[in-house]
Image (tube, helix red, strand yellow):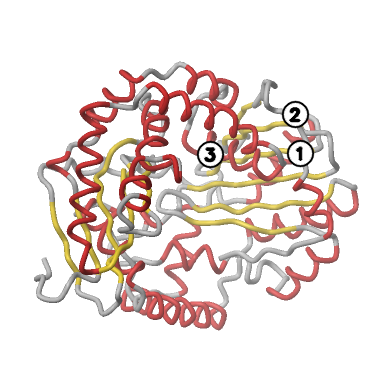
């Protein structure tokens, strides 16, 4: 994971830099000469520049038999580049108050930079960033060290029931699909430094890049910056799209014994991809079902009335291909079956009835009212713009978001839920089953 170098100016970005509650957010879009897609929002309130490059380089793109390669490759990229070792990179960015970051998921991997836009500091920060983008060293000794760390971290995580539950849930939802492949200590140990180099060359390319820019610069400067960043990358070739997620034909129960006192439970199934028109009805409806904290039905029935769980929630996670709907909770082993039965009843009732008028009104009020908080800093806006760019969402997605929420009806919610959530196709994973319950 790329390190974060926090500086004094970062605290300033906690304050709102735009009044976005009623403002149109105009995202400008174009392509560089090498084919990178660019998304730009000028924000002139503070002398800060945020840049994000997203690549189709997440774990779903690992070659067969090389689980863990995408994450390990991403971890190595800023640990030496060009004539700079990892200490040089850290020190040079710290000297100018810049922040290097990034992340990795199933779909994507990203690299980002935050810098002040004073000329000398921006120039110094971009010089380092360009080297990180286009000249990662992948030194053998650094690879061996990070590989060993990754293996040790994974082995420790595999002792925790929450990790075990997640690792059982995804393969159960996505059998024979890249989303369902999990990394093991053995798969990590089998990787080589040349594997990492080849993965970087194939995936961290200009043709595969989405460049998002938010900050204190004009269109001409943004175009020049995007061309510079794209030119630093290998040109590369277009990647094949991920295969469609499997269609679940029947439910499944997976039970994994564990000595923990709590049972960790996941219920769910694959549902929608990013950009699905049912996203907004599902989002609004899920607030009532299990996404609204203490005002949700799951929390009210499972925690407040019966004390089965401290926390229970549900949610949709759209991805490039159909991402999961899930209900998640922890409860005492001896009451796990009762808690699961109740969660399923609450879901079935919601599918049959939909939300009540007061529940719908409360969900809309919260989602509409809280939306500006997703855009009240450069960093938050950058994340939204990067998401729009990577998943190919409409450029007016942010402008229309609140109106799309406002337009949802109870009938819309009920229809969308019944299209995507079928009780007889739920996958149930329980880690820490009660004594005497057989593992399945």
Pointer 3 local density, CA inside 10 Å: few below 14, some 14–19, many at least 20: some
Q: Residues within 10 Å of mark 1 (few under 14, many from 20)?
A: some
- Residue 285 drawn at (x, y percent): 37, 31
Can residue 176 be seen here? The reply is no
- Element assignment for label 3: helix
Q: For residue 399, what is the image quadrant?
A: top right
Earlier-in-chain disc, 2 versus 3: 2
Between residue 399 and residue 2, name the one nearer to us.
Answer: 399
Q: Position of residue 102 (x, y in %)?
A: 59, 56
Q: How many marks?
A: 3
Residue at horizontal 22 percent and vertical 63 percent from the top: 335
Q: Are marks 2 and 1 in contact (CB under 8 Å)?
A: yes
Give me the C-alpha separation between circle 2 and circle 1.
7 Å
Q: Secondary structure at mark 1?
A: loop
Q: Are marks 2 and 3 in contact (CB under 8 Å)?
A: no
- Residue 170's spot in the image, x, y percent? 28, 56
Residue that badge 2 annotates: 19
Instruction: Look at mark 1 in the image and give the residue it sits on.
Output: 16
Compared across the picture, whether 342 is left or right of 138 comes to left
Q: Quadrant of the N terminus?
A: bottom right
Which numbered dot is residue 387?
A: 3
């Amino acid at each position: 994971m790329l390190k974060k170098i926090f500086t004094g100016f970062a605290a300033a970005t906690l304050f709102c830099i735009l009044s976005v509650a009623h403002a149109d957010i105009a995202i400008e879009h174009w392509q560089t000469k090498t084919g990178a897609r660019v998304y730009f929002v000028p924000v002139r309130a503070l002398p800060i520049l945020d840049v994000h490059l997203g690549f189709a380089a997440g774990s779903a793109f690992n070659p067969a038999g090389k689980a863990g390669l995408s994450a390990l490759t991403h971890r190595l990229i800023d640990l030496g580049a060009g004539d700079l070792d990892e200490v040089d990179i850290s020190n040079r960015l710290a000297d100018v108050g810049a922040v290097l970051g990034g992340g990795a998921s199933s779909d994507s991997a990203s690299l980002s930079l935050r810098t002040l836009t004073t000329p000398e500091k921006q120039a110094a920060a971009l010089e380092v960033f360009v080297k990180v983008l286009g000249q990662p060293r992948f030194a053998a000794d650094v690879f061996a060290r990070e590989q060993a760390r990754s293996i040790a971290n994974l082995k420790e995580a595999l002792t925790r029931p929450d990790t075990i539950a997640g690792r059982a849930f995804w393969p159960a939802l996505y059998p024979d699909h890249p989303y369902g492949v999990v990394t093991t200590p053995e798969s990590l140990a089998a990787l080589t430094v040349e594997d990492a180099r080849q993965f970087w060359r194939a995936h961290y390319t200009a043709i595969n890049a989405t460049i998002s820019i938010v900050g204190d610069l004009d269109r001409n400067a943004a175009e020049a910056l995007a061309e510079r960043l794209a030119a630093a990358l290998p040109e590369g070739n277009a990647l094949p799209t991920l295969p469609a997620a499997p269609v679940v034909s029947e439910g499944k129960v997976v039970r994994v014994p564990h000595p923990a006192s709590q049972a960790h439970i996941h219920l769910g199934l694959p549902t929608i991809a990013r950009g699905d028109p049912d996203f907004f009805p599902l989002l609004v409806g899920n607030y009532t079902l299990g996404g609204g904290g203490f005002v949700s039905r799951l929390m009210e029935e499972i925690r407040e009335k019966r004390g089965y769980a401290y926390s229970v929630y549900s949610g949709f996670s759209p991805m490039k291909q159909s991402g999961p709907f899930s209900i998640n909770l922890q409860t005492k082993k001896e009451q796990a079956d009762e808690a699961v039965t109740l969660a399923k009843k609450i879901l079935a009732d919601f599918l049959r009835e939909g939300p009540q008028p007061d529940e719908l009104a409360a969900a809309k009020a919260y989602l509409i009212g809280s939306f500006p908080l997703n855009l009240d800093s450069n960093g938050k806006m950058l994340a939204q713009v990067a998401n729009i760019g990577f998943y190919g969402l409409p450029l007016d997605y942010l402008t229309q978001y609140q109106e799309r929420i406002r337009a949802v009806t109870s009938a819309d919610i009920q229809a969308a839920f019944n299209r995507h959530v079928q009780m007889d196709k739920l996958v149930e994973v329980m880690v820490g089953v009660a004594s005497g319950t057989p593992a399945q």
